[in-house]
Structures are given as structure tokens and as C-alpha cells.
Amino acid sequence: MRITLGVTGGVAAYKAAELVRRLQQENFSVQVVMTRGAREFITPLTFAALSGQKVITDLFSESSEGEANLESAIEHIAVAQRTDLLLVAPATADILAKLARGIADDFLTTLYLASTAPVVVAPAMNVNMWNHAATQENVELLRKRGVQVVNPDEGYLACGMVGSGRLAGQEAIIAAVREALQAKQDLQGETILVTAGPTCEDLDPVRYLTNRSSGKMGYAVAAAAQQRGAKVFLVSGPTSLETPKGVERIAVRSAQQMHEAVTRLFAASTTAILAAAVADYRPAEQSARKIKKSSASLSISLEPTIDILADVAKAKGDRLIVGFAAETDNVAANARTKLTSKNADLIVANDVAAEGAGFDHDTNIVTLFSCDGRDLALPKLTKAEVAERILDEIVRLRGVLHGKSTVRSSSV
């Protein structure tokens, strides 16, 4: 899930850097929006380095010729549409007043009015400012509108006074974020099986055949499914990625091992999302010793590995099965063929030769081909965002195919 973190101008702004890391540990994708005041306390570069994403600082940006950039003029709408939650921490008395009164004079306040996502604010200020009738009235008004307010802690303040006004602790803020997102627990009761990463097919004790898959897409799907309430099994080929929190990871190496693990777990699953880049072929013979180099040519006989997607689909029953198609040409035609021939419900297809898509990237450009004839082409998104859209489509398909109600609607 994607969180937009608004950082405003107070001494506690430096704590927002630690909060970015903490949110990432919870498997949230974080984009930071800074007010002018916030930039007096901490630099945008700090947040860009921590989040790995563009930090937004102005409502309007200028082109190299000094003219207003049209794209920046509507960026707050784009950010509003793709965020799952707006978190403002620290929230100054000034920003609370603007949010409460509907003032939109910078990117953050304009974003607030444009967004329909849940909102959490964590105030931080001088004790007298916090206790002032105007601030308390603004806080009460925001609460009535559904904004979740994380009350500040008591203690020694930067101004030298003691009292309420310190930014709440990270755990309190994270708990409020989780609570605000509870309405999106649309996968509760589901058990989702995800495969990810490459497989390694050994030639000898030293060498093996593999591919460029990093596992990032499958791991993003596993993390997103867990956050939305599902029990998640992650069957993973060799990767350097950390196991998402709350996900049960089963480490495998070869296509045969992955097939065995998937077969064992499939019976207990309601949905299988097979994102792994499984080797299509393996050496027909594996040498027990290292094959020595010589001046002669070397020929390797290959045999096909088992088709995991097609095999599990034979016994899918009312389970949903999602496959992936990494293509270099005729993407739509190949994806539709795979959807039918493999008896899948959804194929996630992309052109791995396209810039910003495929292996080794943190972004992806995919089209979702559904068994009910719907084709949904997505723009370039982070893999975490793509994961959410895949899960949205699964929820929609389950409603269409099995008559179950859906909590979230599919959106771009």
C-alpha cells in the first residue's frame, strides 16, 4: 500500500525521517510531501534517499525556460488518486488550521482536499499552542470529518517547556495507520499462495542455469496481500530480498522443488499467484563433478521442466489462479493465448524490453488480462502499486465468478 507522508515545519520534522523507515518496515511504499517550513528543518534529499521516491515540495514547478510546468499543476490530483492513506507527521498548528478550514495554498493542503483516502495527523507543537482553544477547535472539527488524530505525548519540549506537544511515538502512529486502513482488509479469510524469484537448474556442483528475476514483483504481491488480511505462503527461489512481515516463506532452488512446494500448499489456498520466473528447461544430466574446461566445444542437452501453472490449474476448483507473462513481442496475443491454454483466471503481462519494466527494476508496466474479457493496461507504477492493482483485480474477479462481495474497486 502507498502512503503519502506530509512533513510540516516544526522541530519534530527530523523524526519523520525515522518514521519513513518504520513505515517501510511495515511494507508500505512512502512518498513524502514537504511544506516550505519543513524544508527549514530537514532537506528533501534526506527523504528522497530514504524513500527512493521523488519528494514533492511545491504546488507548481518551473521548466528550464522558467515557465510553469503543466504536469506539476495537476500532480496533486495524480498523487491523490494513487495514495491509500495520507499521513501528516509532524502536523503543526498552522497545518491543522488550514486542513480544518479548507485552505489550499500549497501542495499538501491541496492534496488533502483532492484525496478521498483515509487521513491520519500527528500534531507536534508548543504546549500552549496545542492547548489553545483555536487549535482544539480545529482538531475537533477534523475528527468530526473522519480524520484520525494521534494525540501528542507529554514531556520536555524543544522550547524548554514541559507538557503536551511532543510528536507521538512511532508505534502509536503506526497503530493509527493500521487502524485507518482496516477498512481495506478485503482479503481476510483468504489464503494466498505466491511464487517469486528465479529457479536455478544445476549443471554441475559449480554451474547452473538461471534468469534475471529479482523476485521483487512476487515479494511485493505477498506483502500487499498480507497487509490486506490474507494468510500468505511465499514459495521463493534464490533472492536477496527480506521476507515480508507476517508472510510464511518457503525457500526452494529448482523448478522441481518449487513444483513440489506449490503442489503441497495449493490444496490449502484460495488463490495462487504464480509470479516466479521458473526455468523452462534444465540440464538433462547433472554432473557430480565440475566439468573441466577444454579446447573442445561443449554441448548441453536440455529437457523441459514441469509447467507449474498448467499443472495446478488442472485441479483448481473454485480457486483463482494468476499467471505472469514476461514477453518481448506480441504481448497481448501471447498473454491471451496463455490465459486460455493454462486455464488461468488472470494473466499479468509485460514487455520486459520496455524501459522501466521487467527484471531488476523497482517499477513495472503491465496489462492485466482477465478471463471475463477485461484488459486493464496500467501506466508505469512501482511494483508495490502494481501488486495492489493485481489484488484489486482478484477481488473483482472473485465477485464476478463466485458472487462474493468486493470491498475495493479496481482503479488505476
Image (cartoon, rainbow, N blue to C red):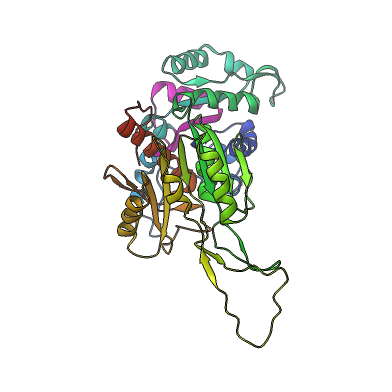
Asked whether residue 31 is in view, the answer is no
Give the residue furthest to the top. 133
Give the residue furthest to the left. 373
Residue depicted at x 62% and y 20%: 152
Hey, which quadrant is residue 184 in on the image? top left
313 to the left or right of 149: left
Is 91 magenta? The answer is yes
Give the residue furthest to the bottom. 295
Where 111 sits versus 354, above or below?
above
Residue 341 percent across, percent down from the top left: 34, 53
Residue depicted at x 51% and y 29%: 229
Residue depicted at x 31% and y 44%: 371
Residue 359 percent across, percent down from the top left: 50, 59
Residue 122 percent across, percent down from the top left: 56, 25
Residue 259 percent across, percent down from the top left: 54, 50
Asked whether residue 75 is in view, the answer is yes
Q: Nearer the viewer, residue 250 or 226?
A: 250
Hey, which quadrant is residue 246 in on the image? top right
281 to the left or right of 405: right
Q: Nearer the viewer, residue 246 or 115?
A: 246
Is 61 magenta? The answer is no
Q: Nearer the viewer, residue 238 or 241?
A: 238
Q: Nearer the viewer, residue 148 or 141?
A: 148
Locate the C terminus by quadrant: top left
Residue range corresponding to the magenta coloring: 81-108
